[in-house]
Amino acid sequence: MKIAILGAMPEEIEPLLEKVEDIVRVDYANNTYYKATYKGIEIVIAYSKIGSAFSTLTATILLEKFGCDKLLFSGVAGAINEELEIGDLIYATKLCKHDLDITAFGHPHGFVPEGKVFIYPNEELTEIAKEVANSKDIELKGGVIATGDQFIHDNTKKEWIKETFNADAIEMEGYSVALVCDALNVPFFILRAISDSANSDASFDFDEFLEKSAKVSADFILEMVERV
Ligand code: SAH
């Protein structure tokens, strides 16, 4: 078994690279992949760069070139659900693409023909995450994660995404990664720690809390690796 661990930004994978062993760096397709082991388990770590295009590319390479047979995403997100606070962990129960819009042709938001509005992660990995949370007494929430190629820092937009997709958190890569894994039948799990509340303070909060929240997520993901 080989597990892919993917982030979007360097800050999201740095806490992982500090804890794994036997790192071998592979440069490929304008990106760097870190083959490594953690407690004897083979893993490949990478950050994709921000957004759906880059994350689609990196997720595909992790599965097709490196042969990973499970994928865990670790990163940060903006909160939409008011119950989520900075530093809280949320995993995706399903994911959608909030900025996919061909409604002019009568289709719902987030839908294109032969696609799906929502993609669902693997239940077994979700159960493992719940076990980790229980055993370590970590609060872990599940919810709808909305992906789009925009940093949301505006209450009106945030409310629209909440109402349209019933979303709890917002980020820029989850749906694309989910789409790749779903198409290739590879079990995946998307975890995010909250870095901001997607409101007018979001860019300031993001800069302040990115590293701390990214580490919360990365530490949890490594706990999961041991049990996968
Ligand atoms: N500060 C960075 C840009 C960060 S973009 C720079 O200047 O390079 C935000 C990243 O964090 C994305 O990878 C996204 O997945 C996640 N994210 C966190 N909060 C978000 C929000 N409010 N809206 C959208 N994505 C968010």
Image: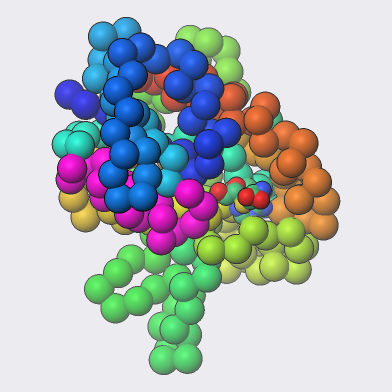
Magenta segment boundaries in residue numbering: 49-65
Quarter of the image with the C terminus is top left
The residue drawn where x is 57% and y is 33% is: 11
Question: How many badges with numbers are in the image?
Answer: 0
State whether residue 90 appears in this view: no
Q: Is residue 113 left or right of residue 162?
A: left
Q: Is residue 73 left or right of residue 181?
A: right
The percent coordinates of residue 98 (x first, y second) are 52, 66
How is the structure coloured here? rainbow
The percent coordinates of residue 70 (x first, y second) are 25, 34
The residue drawn where x is 72% and y is 53% is: 198
**Considering only vertical position in the picture, is 26 above or below 159?**
above
Q: Is residue 61 magenta?
A: yes
**Considering only vertical position in the picture, is 194 above or below 140?**
below
The percent coordinates of residue 162 (x first, y second) are 63, 61
Q: Is residue 140 left or right of residue 31?
A: right
Q: Predominant secondary structure in magenta?
A: helix
State whether residue 139 appears in this view: yes
The percent coordinates of residue 9 (x first, y second) are 53, 41
Q: Is residue 63 magenta?
A: yes
The residue drawn where x is 44% and y is 84% is: 102
Viewer-nearest residue: 123 or 52: 52
The residue drawn where x is 31% and y is 13% is: 22
- As drawn, which residue projects farthest toward the bottom? 105
Q: Quadrant of residue 34?
A: top left
Q: Is residue 158 left or right of residue 2?
A: right
